[in-house]
Amino acid sequence: MNLFSSNISDASWDFMNLTGVESNFFTYDQPDKIILICFYIPVFFVALVGNILVLVMVFLQRSMKRNTTNYFLVNLAVADLLVTVFCIPLTIAENIYTLWMYGDFMCRITGYLQGIYVEASVLTIVCMSIDRYLAIRYPMRSRAACNHTRVKQLILLTWILAAVVMAPLLVVRRVETHKIDEYVTLYFCQEDWPSFRDRQIYDVFLLFCAYIFPGGIVVVLYIRIGCSLWKPDHALQRENSVVSNEVRMLTSRRKLARMMIVISVLFALSWMPYFIVNVSMDFLSTEKEHRSNLFAVYPFALLLGHSNSAQNPLLYCVMHRGFNNFLHKFFRCRCNELVLTRQASTLSSGEKEKSKTVTFLGSKLFRHKKQLVIKATGVGTPI
């Protein structure tokens, strides 16, 4: 998807107006760009802090590592964090200054990595839906099938598949130069396909690989999971009857499955406008005015997709009891440290006065032949 597609070669700028040409590519003062940046800033910070806290929670608590589902949550948090760190700042920079100034390598690798992160998130959600389906429908079998080794192998496979699916972007993305005259050359990072038909085929391929096909799998699996959650399954109860704490385990699985359903729905709704705009620009934008409208909507559709990286940590705060408890303990610990530090500084400022008072009392009591033990901290405790 090219963010800039106007025909620069047909422009007729002269040397006296070169300064105006350069300034045309700074768009930070446009109202739509200001609104876009104002939305991106909270999305960036919420996604950055939230996903880091998710990773800290899992790595600090051993109990979290026992559940294989948390491996998928970690993988999803890693993908969201990479989107936050690499995709969002670059997207903001491209919207502020449309010229490319990072070189050909960065042009190729950034688009490729952005595609990998999004595709890895999609495949991770599919894996989570399969994991929840097995845990709800076949709880005894899922323990043997979804062990830690296999889950790690499956996560590695998701990244390999994402890298393969996005590989064409390494070839077609390149920096195109538009020389205005001997003094000014403009650089743009664009996709240079052999033909427009090839680009259409690949965009349709991405639509199915990153949205329709994975979405279909997730919908089918969660419909079947929903039948187990809301309708009593006697076969499932008999299979679970040999397991201790049956009711508590089944309730926990149902809560986790509900959270996974919400994660999948949010992802689908967040990225739906992006894919609609993308396909529309390939097949429906025959008129110049229609195409310009799609280009105006495209940055906001991408913003909605990027916001999904911030939605998951917020969702965990509401629906993940372990993450909610961790946040309470984490911030309570930080607050206690601040209180103790303040108390320590207060005690150190009054330490000399307390020492003088205790020394005077000690000498007076000694003259009256009474035993008193005085601690070094200045607080006396009679024995």
Image: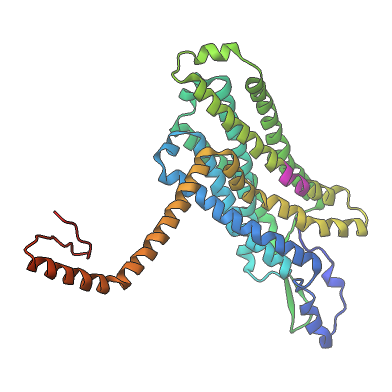
Count of residue discs? 0
- Quarter of the image for residue 177 reads bottom right
Residue 316 on the magenta segment:
no
Q: Position of residue 221 (x, y in %)?
A: 65, 27
Magenta-colored segment: predominant secondary structure: helix
Q: Is residue 265 above or below residue 54?
A: above
Give how far across and how far down residue 181 sits, in percent: 78, 82
Instruction: Please name whichever residue, 104 or 102, is drawn nearer the observer in this view of the structure.
Output: 102
Residue 94, percent across and down?
70, 65
The segment highlighted magenta reads 269-275
Q: Quadrant of residue 372?
A: bottom left
Front one among 143 and 115: 143
Relative to 92, does residue 156 appear above or below in the rendering? above
**Above or below for 347 versus 294:** below
Residue 88 seen from this side: yes
In this image, 164 relative to 184: left or right?
left
**Image x and y of residue 20, in percent:** 81, 82
Residue found 63% across the figure and 20% down from its top = 228
Q: Residue furthest bottom?
A: 16
Q: Quadrant of residue 191?
A: bottom right
Q: Is residue 189 visible?
A: no
Tell me if 221 is positioned left or right of 246 in this view.
right
Q: Residue furthest left?
A: 369
Residue at figure coordinates x 66%, y 23% from the top left: 224
The residue depicted at 84 percent of the width and 66 percent of the height is 6
State how the image is colored.
rainbow
The N terminus: image quadrant:
bottom right
Does residue 271 show up magenta in the picture? Answer: yes
Residue at coordinates 77% horizontally, 43% vertically from top-left?
A: 204
